[in-house]
Image: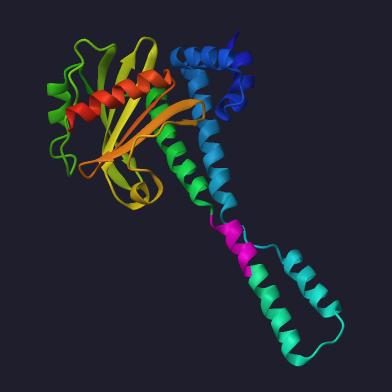
Amino acid sequence: MNCEGWKEKLDAYADGELPPETTRSMAEHLSGCPACTAEMVQIVQQKRVTASAGKRYSAPPELRARIRQQIAAKPARGGWQWALGLALAAVAVIGLGLAIMLPSRTAARNQLIAGVVDRHITALASASPVDVVSSDRHTVKPWFAGKLPFTFNLPELAGSPFTLDGGRMVYLDSRPGAHLIYGVRKHRLSVFILQEGGDFSRLLPTAAEPWRSLSFNVTSWSAGGLRYFVVSDAAPEDVSALAALLKQANS
Ligand SMILES: [Zn+2]
């Protein structure tokens, strides 16, 4: 399939709606095609903007007017009943407004995870995905010293299928963190390490729990005051295996 053919499927890919076989081929194509990857980043960002715009809507004026009309059309009642009816209607309007304005906890968590996936895609789509290019953890780890308000350990990869490409600075939930990029076979994995707190502590579980988001496998856990994420289009077993190595290195 040529790029035009892939581009038509990007939207469905971003929504995780493609069959597994096509999803795999798409991931493979994206890992070697900057043009399609750039378009993919745009689609993901567009989806995020639309999702956050949706949160700002409140009950539309027509709905308020209709409720008022319904109240007015009711047969006359005693003073306190009328007041109670009005109060209940007001509660209904406020409740509806809040339900539309406040995303559910799950929606907020999914958006946080989508943000992490977004950073992974954006980094891989950029001309230089890493700021410190090295396969040696003893070079990559010290590069972050002085840039981050915390330290962490990177795992020994000898005997594992993983390779280290390097690292870069990242900002997630308004806090600075380390973004490490690893390889496994033809896939890239992003590891994000940040301080725990804020939305991370509020929305994400402490223990690792795999998610699927935008056709990517994501796992996240909290340990020693730090929040870890592993994101990749690689198999869930690969994501779990790298997570296990990181946990071991930081235990
Ligand atoms: Zn392409």
Is residue 98 on the magenta stretch?
yes
Give the image location of residue 249, x and y in percent.
18, 27
Left or right side of 181 for 108: right
- What is the residue that sits farthest to the bottom in this orientation? 79
How many tags in the picture? Answer: 0
Is residue 128 shown to the viewer in this render? no
Q: Is residue 46 above or below residue 217?
A: below
**Front residue of 47 and 96:** 96
Q: Is residue 168 above or below residue 127?
A: below
Quadrant where the N terminus lies? top right
**Front residue of 100 and 129:** 100
Q: Using the rendered view, name the quadrant where residue 149 is placed.
A: top left
Residue at x 36%, y 9% (from the top left corner): 185
Left or right side of 152 for 177: right
Colouring method of the image: rainbow
Q: Is residue 172 above or below residue 127?
A: below
Quadrant where the C terminus lies? top left
Is residue 184 shown to the viewer in this render? yes
Residue at x 30%, y 22% (from the top left corner): 242
Q: Main secondary structure of the magenta part?
A: helix
Residue at x 54%, y 57% (from the top left corner): 102
Q: Is residue 247 above or below residue 102?
A: above
Residue at x 54%, y 53% (from the top left corner): 103
Left or right side of 194 for 99: right
Give the image location of residue 189, x and y in percent.
35, 22
Give the image location of residue 132, x and y in percent.
22, 24
What span is in magenta?
Answer: 94-102
Q: Using the rendered view, name the quadrant where residue 3 is placed.
A: top right
Is residue 96 on the magenta stretch?
yes
Give the image location of residue 240, x and y in percent.
35, 24
